[in-house]
Amino acid sequence: AQRVTQPEKLLSVFKGAPVELKCNYSYSGSPELFWYVQYSRQRLQLLLRHISRESIKGFTADLNKGETSFHLKKPFAQEEDSAMYYCAPTPPNTGNQFYFGTGTSLTVIP
Amino acid sequence: GAGVSQTPSNKVTEKGKYVELRCDPISGHTALYWYRQSLGQGPEFLIYFQGTGAADDSGLPNDRFFAVRPEGSVSTLKIQRTERGDSAVYLCASSLTFIGTNTGELFFGEGSRLTVL
C-alpha cells in the first residue's frame, strides 16, 4: 500500500513566487515528519523536521492531522531552491525506520 | 572521512553475476540503512541495521539480496544472480540513535550506481 504520496513529480515556479510541495501520508497515529532535499550533484540531506518547528532556508512545513498532510511551503522561491524534494514520514512506534515519497522536482525559473 | 562513504561509485556487471556494495558509515553512528533508488523514484527502503543486527529487512525484494554488518560499522550489500531489474543507485545512510528517540537525520552517501547488462 502506498504510504507516502507526493502528487507532483515536477513543479515549476517563477523566482519570487510562493511554492508549495505537497505530501500526504497514510499512517494512523502521529508519525514523525521530515523533508529531505537533493540539490544537483549533491547528496540527499535533511531539510527540516516537524518536531523542531523550524524554518530552514525559508521553508516551513505544517502538519494537518485531519488531512494527513505535511506540505512544504516557502513564500518567495529562489533559484537555489531548485532541487528534488522528498517527504519522509516515519510510521509511529517503529523506532528509526524511514520511508520516502517519490519526490518532487522543483524548478525555480529566473 | 567525515561522511558516509560508498564503494564502488559505479559498477557494471552482467546478468547472473554476484555483486557486493560497501558502505562505511560515519564513525559512532549505530544505525545504518540501505535504500535503492530507481530512475524517477524516491529512495526505496531495503534494510536497517541497529549495531550488528538487522532490525528490519522487510524491504529486501527477494532472497537474492542480503546485507551484513558484522562489526557494527561497515556494511556490505550482496546481490546474487543479478538481473537487469536490479539496475539502480544503491544508497547507504547512517544515523545516531538514542533509545526511544527518533533523531530524524539520516546522513547519506553518494550512492553506488549498479548497471546490470
Image: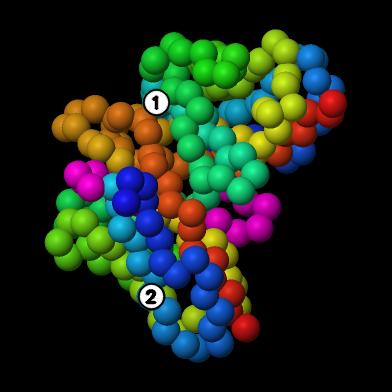
Amino acid at pointer 1: Glu
Pointer 1 and pointer 2 on the same chain: no
Quarter of the image with the C terminus of chain A is top right
**Residue B72: percent from left, percent from top:** 17, 56
- Label 2 residue SS: strand
Compared with B102, B70 (above or below) is below
**Residue A47: percent from left, percent from top:** 51, 28
- The stretch in magenta equals B27-42
Amino acid at pointer 2: Glu
Compared with B36, A51 (above or below) is above
Query: Mark 2 = which residue?
Result: B20
Compared with A51, A3 (above or below) is below
Query: Mark 1 = which residue?
Result: A32
| Count of marks placed on residues | 2
**Residue A98: percent from left, percent from top:** 40, 40
Q: Nearer the viewer, residue A93 or A100?
A: A100
- Label 1 residue SS: strand
Report the side of A3 relative to B30 (left or right): right
- Name which residue lies at 66% across and 58% down: B39
Report the side of A87 relative to A40 (left or right): left
Q: Which mark is residue B2?
A: none
